[in-house]
C-alpha cells in the first residue's frame, strides 16, 4: 500500500500561505510582561490593599502602552480591557453605589486618557502605597517577579 498522493492529484505545499510565528507575535511579545504588573494595581485596589485611585495611573499607562505599541489592534484591546475592568469594579463592593459609579467613571477616563496618548503622569498623581506593595521586602504575599516600580514606569516603557 502506498502513502503517496493519488494518481492525477497535486500535492499541496503547506509551507506557503502562513506567516512565520515570530512575525505574528513579535509586536505582542512584551505586552503581557508589561501589562500584568500594571493591572495588578486594580487587583490590589479590589483587595483593599491600596485606595482605588491608585489603579488609575497604571491603567492609564497600560492603555497608552497598548495604543502606542499595537496601533489599531491596541485600541481594540483597550476597549475590551476597559469592559473587563469596569465589570471588575462593579463586583468590588464599593459602597455607597455612587462611589462605585465614580470609580468606574474615573477608570474609564483613565483608559481613554492613556489611549489618546495624553500624559498619565500629569493627570494621575503617583500613589506611594503601590511602591510599598511592589518591594520584595514588603509584607505583601506576592511572590517574584514582584511588580514594576510604579514611580519609574516612564523609564521602563520608554
Image (cartoon, rainbow, N blue to C red):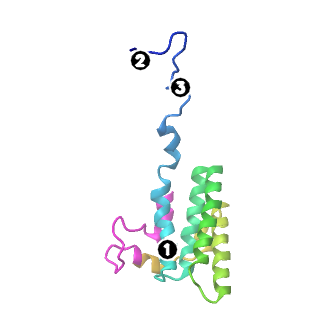
Query: Which of marks 3 and 1 precedes in the sequence?
Result: 3
Q: Nearer the viewer, mark 2 or mark 1?
A: 2
- Distance from the alpha carbon under mark 3 to that under mark 2: 22 Å
Q: Which residue is mark 1?
A: 43
Q: Nearer the viewer, mark 3 or mark 2?
A: 2
Query: Which of marks 2 and 3 precedes in the sequence?
Result: 2
Q: State whether the magenta stretch is mostly helix, strand or loop.
A: loop
Picture residue at 65% right of the left edge, 76% below the top = 104
Horizontal side of 103 relative to 37 (left or right) equals right
Name above or below for residue 24 compared with residue 101. above
Q: Quadrant of residue 106?
A: bottom right
Query: Which of marks 1 and 2 precedes in the sequence?
Result: 2
Residue 16: which numbered mark, if any?
Answer: 3
Image coordinates for residue 137, horizontal then vertical, percent: 31, 76
Q: Is residue 108 magenta?
A: no
Q: Residue furthest front?
A: 1
Name above or below for residue 43 compared with residue 82. below
The answer to whether mark 2 and mark 1 are in CB contact below 8 A is no
- Tag 2: Cα neighbours inside 10 Å, few (<14), some, or many (≥20)? few
Horizontal side of 130 relative to 142 (left or right) equals right
Q: Which region of the structure is painted magenta?
A: 133-158
Residue 70: which numbered mark, if any?
Answer: none
Image coordinates for residue 70, horizontal then vertical, percent: 59, 50
- Distance from the alpha carbon under mark 1 to that under mark 3: 44 Å
Q: Which residue is mark 2?
A: 3
The answer to whether mark 3 and mark 2 are in CB contact below 8 A is no
Q: Residue furthest left?
A: 137
Q: Which one is nearer the viewer's eye here, 86 or 91?
A: 91
Picture residue at 51% right of the left edge, 38% below the top = 23
Q: Secondary structure at mark 1?
A: helix
Picture residue at 67% right of the left edge, 71% below the top = 109
Quarter of the picture containing the N terminus is top left
Amino acid at each position: 500500500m502506498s502513502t503517496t498522493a493519488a494518481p492525477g492529484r497535486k500535492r499541496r505545499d503547506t509551507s506557503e500561505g502562513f506567516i512565520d510565528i515570530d512575525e505574528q507575535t513579535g509586536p505582542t511579545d512584551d505586552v503581557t510582561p508589561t501589562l500584568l504588573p500594571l493591572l495588578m494595581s486594580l487587583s490590589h485596589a479590589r483587595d483593599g490593599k491600596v485606595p482605588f485611585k491608585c489603579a488609575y495611573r497604571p491603567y492609564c499607562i497600560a492603555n497608552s502602552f497598548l495604543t502606542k505599541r499595537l496601533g489599531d489592534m491596541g485600541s481594540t484591546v483597550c476597549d475590551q480591557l476597559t469592559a473587563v475592568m469596569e465589570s471588575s469594579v462593579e463586583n468590588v463592593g464599593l459602597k455607597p453605589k455612587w462611589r462605585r459609579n465614580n470609580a468606574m467613571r474615573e477608570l474609564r477616563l483613565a483608559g481613554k486618557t492613556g489611549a489618546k496618548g495624553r500624559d498619565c503622569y500629569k493627570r494621575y498623581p503617583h500613589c506611594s502605597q503601590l511602591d510599598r506593595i511592589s518591594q520584595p521586602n514588603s509584607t505583601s504575599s506576592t511572590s517574584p517577579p514582584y511588580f514594576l516600580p510604579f514611580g519609574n514606569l516612564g523609564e521602563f516603557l520608554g
